[in-house]
Image: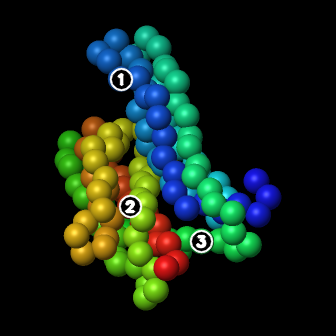
Amino acid sequence: PGRRHLFSGGFQRTDFVAGGGNFVTESRAISPKSWRVVGHAFGAFGGELTAVAYCVRSGKPRLAEVSSSTVLGTGSTGTATTPGCPPGRRLTAGGFSSNGSESVFFTNGMINADGTWSGSGYNTGAATNLTAYGYCLKL
């Protein structure tokens, strides 16, 4: 709200058991002030899903975005790794998107030692893209 801008985000409260639940298919910044989380429900029940945005008072946006995508074939795993941050910025957070696919299970995301962000997933459906988003904070 107001003069606050995003510096990170994420999600909480997914449910995933044999009888049903939900899983996250996207968690990323969509503007300098908003973090979006998208999930897919399956089986006998859905579950709760909460998007979380972390903001700081600032007169202008604090983050620059870097991204990269990879193709996940049917029944395959893959990892997308972003480029590094522009000069004067440091990677502080990451996000991902299965780009509308409901068949990708996000398996992990991490900040790498070289200042890049990697997001990995497993695809159970038709070939699709997985995109990793890195968020670079101005120093």
Q: For residue 4, which quarter of the picture? A: bottom right
In three-dimensional space, the C-alpha distance between marks 1 and 2, rounded to whole angstroms, equals 23 Å
Instruction: Name the residue tied to disc 1.
Output: 16
Question: How much space separates mark 2 and mark 3, taking CA atoms?
Answer: 19 Å
> Which residue is tagged 3?
62
Helix, strand or loop at mark 3: loop
Gap in Å between the C-alphas at discs 3 and 1? 34 Å
Assess disc 3: are there few (<14), some (14-19) or many (≥20) residues with their C-alpha within 10 Å of its C-alpha: many
Of labels 2 and 3, earlier in sequence is 3
Residue that label 2 marks: 132
- The reply to whether dot 1 and dot 2 touch (C-beta < 8 Å) is no
Q: Secondary structure at mark 2?
A: strand
Residue 67 visible from this viewpoint:
no
The residue mark sitting in front, 2 or 3, is 3
Residue 91 at x, y = what percent? 40, 70
Q: Position of residue 139 (x, y in %)?
A: 49, 79
Instruction: Please give left or right for residue 82 compared with residue 135 in the image.
Output: left
Q: Secondary structure at mark 1?
A: strand
Residue 41, which numbered label?
none
Q: Quadrant of residue 24?
A: top left
From the top left corner, tell me how far across and down residue 45 is, in percent. Answer: 47, 14
Is residue 137 among the parts visible in the rendering?
yes
